Amino acid sequence: MSQKANQTGVLTAAILAAMVSANAGAQPSLVSERVITLEEVFHTSRDEGENVDSPAIWHGSNGENWLLATAKEGNAILAYDAATGDYITRVGETGDGPGQFERPNGIWVIDDMMLVVERDNQRIQVFSLPALQSIGMMTHEDLRLPYGLSVTPRDDGSYDLYVTDNFNPALEGYPPEEELDERIHHFRYQRQGDTISSEHVGTFGDTQGPGLLVKVESLYYDAEYDRLLIADEAFSQRSIKIYNGAGDFTGEVIPNVFFDSEPEGIALYACDNGDGYWIITDLNRSDENKFEIFDRRSLSHLGTVKGEITRNTDGIWLSQKSFGPFAGGALFPVHDDGSITAFDWQEIAEGLSLGLDCTL
C-alpha cells in the first residue's frame, strides 16, 4: 500500500512540565503539533478471541523475518511473515509445563531467543529460535502479576531482564503506596546451549513522589543512557517514569501532557552514536489512538503518528532492518486486541522530517 499522509502544524509554543525533575521544578519544553496519518502497509488476519497483546520481530540468519505475537486468551504465540503479514503458525497450549502458557502477555526477542511473560503462570519462559523450543523459565516467590519485559545484553555474555509486576488486590485496584516498591523485578540470566541459568537481582519502585509507580505494564531499557522507561497507565499518572538500571528514579518524567489516554507500548530507534528516537503509544479505542515520537537524547517531543485503522494499541515493536517492502525498517503495533498492523518507518521519518537513517 502507498503512503497517505496528512500533516498538520509545526513545532510550536512552550508548555510547562514537558519534563519534570525530582530536584528541580517543572521545565519548559516545546511540544510539537506535527501530526501525520499513515496508511498501514498490511494488517494480519484478525481474531479478537485470541486477545492479541504484544508483538516482536525475529530476523533469522537464513533470511527468516518472523512477526511473533502473544495471544492472551488463546494461550499461544502467533507467528506471521513480517514482510507480508501472512499467517505462518501458532505455538503453545494452555498449561504450566514447558511450551505451555497461561495468559502470555509481554514478549521480547533478542539474539536467537524469544522471551514470553506469563501473567497467570507468574513466570518468564525462554524459547530458542527458530526451533521455538522452551529452554528455561524464570520466576520468583514475589513475582505476582507480571506483564511487560525489557532485555538487554551485558558485556560478559549474560542478559539483564526487567519485568513489570502489576500486582493488585482484585485486578482493577491498586495496593497501598507503601507496597509499591516491588513494581519492577530485575533478573540476570545466561544461556548455555539449550539451557538457561538465572538469578533474581532484586525489586524496585518508588512509593511516593514523582517516581511513584502505580499501574505498570510496558517498559524499555536503553543501556546507552542507563535509562529505564516505565509506562504508568494510572489515570492520576499517565506518564513515563525514568529509572536507571540499578533501580533508582532519575528524576526524569515524560508527563501526561503528551498522553490523552494511556501510555502503553514503548519502542526505541537506536543509532550507534547515541542518536535515535523513542516511540510511545497513547492507547485509545478511537481515531485518537496515536504514537508519540521523542528524541532519544533530549526526550524532546518531535511529532505524532496515527494509523488509518490502527486502534486500541497495547504493545509495539520496531525493526530497523531493511527487509521485504521496508527499506528503512518498520513499526508493528497491535490493533484492537485481534491483529497486528505494520507501518513503513521511512514514511514515518519523512512525514515528521526525522533526519536519522540507522537502518541495519
Image (tube, rainbow, N blue to C red):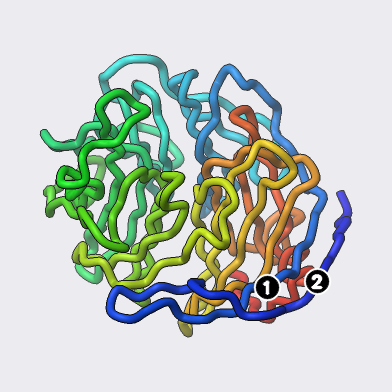
Using the rendered view, name the quadrant where residue 205 is placed. bottom left
Using the rendered view, name the quadrant where residue 84 is placed. top right
Rounded to the nearest angstrom, the CA distance separating label 2 from label 1 is 8 Å
Q: In the rendered structure, are the residues bearing label 2 and label 1 in contact, judged by CB atoms less than 8 Å apart? A: yes
Q: Is residue 299 visible?
A: yes
- Left or right: 218 with respect to 186? right
> Mark number for residue 32?
1
On screen, residue 162 above or below 351: above
Residue at 71% across / 58% down in the picture? Answer: 305
> How many discs mark residues in the rendered view?
2
Nearest the eye: 16 or 93 = 16
In which quadrant is the C terminus drawn?
bottom right
Q: Estimate the x, y position of residue 60 in percent, counting from the top left.
A: 51, 51
Q: Estimate the x, y position of residue 235 in percent, counting from the top left.
A: 46, 45
- Left or right: 249 with respect to 11? left
- Left or right: 260 with respect to 117? right
Residue at 36% across / 23% down in the picture? Answer: 101
**Dot 1: few (<14), some (14–19), or many (≥20) neighbours within 10 Å?**
many
> Mark number for residue 316?
none
Q: Mark 1 falls on what kind of element?
A: strand
Q: Estimate the x, y position of residue 186 in percent, counting from the top left.
A: 20, 52
Nearest the eye: 283 or 110 = 283
Q: Is residue 272 visible?
A: no
On screen, residue 103 above or below 40: above
Residue at 48% across / 19% down in the picture? Answer: 73
Lower position in the chain sequence, tag 2 or tag 1: 2
Using the rendered view, name the quadrant where residue 338 is placed. top right
Query: Which amino acid type corresponds to the residue marked 1 in the rendered image?
Result: Ser
On screen, residue 204 above or below 131: below
Query: Which amino acid type corresponds to the residue marked 2 in the rendered image?
Result: Gly
Residue at 64% across / 45% down in the picture? Answer: 82
Residue identifier under label 2: 9
